[in-house]
Amino acid sequence: MCKKSVASILVSAIVFSGSVYADVNKTSVDLGYKFYTSDTKNDNPGVFNQPFVKLNHLGIADWGTYFANLKLENPAEIAENQKHLDGKTTIKSLLILENKLGESQFNFWTQNFISASETLVEDNLYLGVTHNAKIQNLSLNYGVGLNYTIGSFSPTSEKFNDLSGYAVVLNAKYPFELLGFKHSLSLNYEAQIDRDEAHQALFSYDSYGHQIITTLQTGFTDSIFSKLYITHYDSWGSQYNDGIEYGISVGYQF
């Protein structure tokens, strides 16, 4: 794994989230395991079932919101890949900033996602506008922006560093109570449209790609929770030939 990339992930996500003032701060850690369907494994040789640990931080202030997380997949190469060898470790970071535009429900949106392993680094930076809406208990957030991608693939020594089309996001969240527990059902859609041809060639992508994550979170106490999720990928990440990932995790909110 590229040491400089890992260092930049740690510094940008942890230092930033710890230094920005917010009226509300929520920090949590998840321990989980993710799986792939048989068809997904057949179509995408690089995927394999593996554990993960994720650190999350949410801040809400009068100027807007920010969210940061760090995710370590297959720590210490615990799980085997499809070739029955030690699977690679991947570290991922996500940083989302939404600055309110006056008194409106619009926000200036900045999002940066980095995925780094021994062989591959992909950094997607979105700059655009999002809008918040609420329909009774359903919270919505959606937006569009430009996508700037930096990527490299060490086996071929190929690199990419340029604008690469557009990004579209839609986030929906619906809280409810059932059987005496508090639950939250969320849907997160993220797409890249009209990717640059060199970007496509580097990661074997199509012009369009998306991930759609559906998550059910259940709170057992004010601090302890579980998550069940399923994700559909279309020309995204390791699932360049599409696929389905699903998983479970337990977490603790500080």
Image (spheres, rainbow, N blue to C red):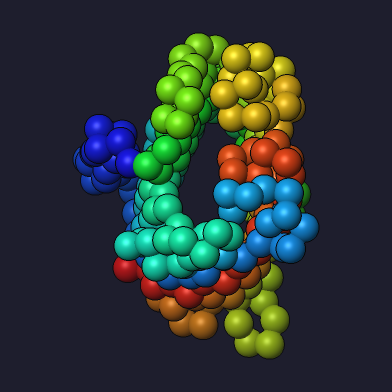
Give the residue drawn at x 32%, y 68%: 254
Q: Would you say 164 lies left or right of 254 here?
A: right
Q: Would you say 92 lies left or right of 17 here?
A: right
Give the residue drawn at x 33%, y 41%: 1
Q: Nearer the viewer, residue 130 or 135?
A: 130
Residue 41 position within the rendered picture, expressed as x and y whole percent measured from the top left: 68, 56
Residue 132 position within the rendered picture, expressed as x and y whole percent measured from the top left: 63, 37
Q: Nearer the viewer, residue 124 or 127?
A: 124
Question: Does residue 41 lie above or below 103 as drawn?
Answer: below
Residue 57 position within the rendered picture, expressed as x and y whole percent measured from the top left: 37, 52
- Residue at the far bottom: name it: 179
Give the residue drawn at x 68%, y 70%: 176
In which quadrant of the rendered view does residue 39 lie? bottom right
Residue 167 can be seen, yes or no:
yes
Residue 172 can be seen, yes or no:
no
Residue 71 position within the rendered picture, expressed as x and y whole percent measured from the top left: 41, 53
Give the residue drawn at x 58%, y 49%: 46
Question: Does residue 72 lie above or below 222 as drawn?
Answer: above
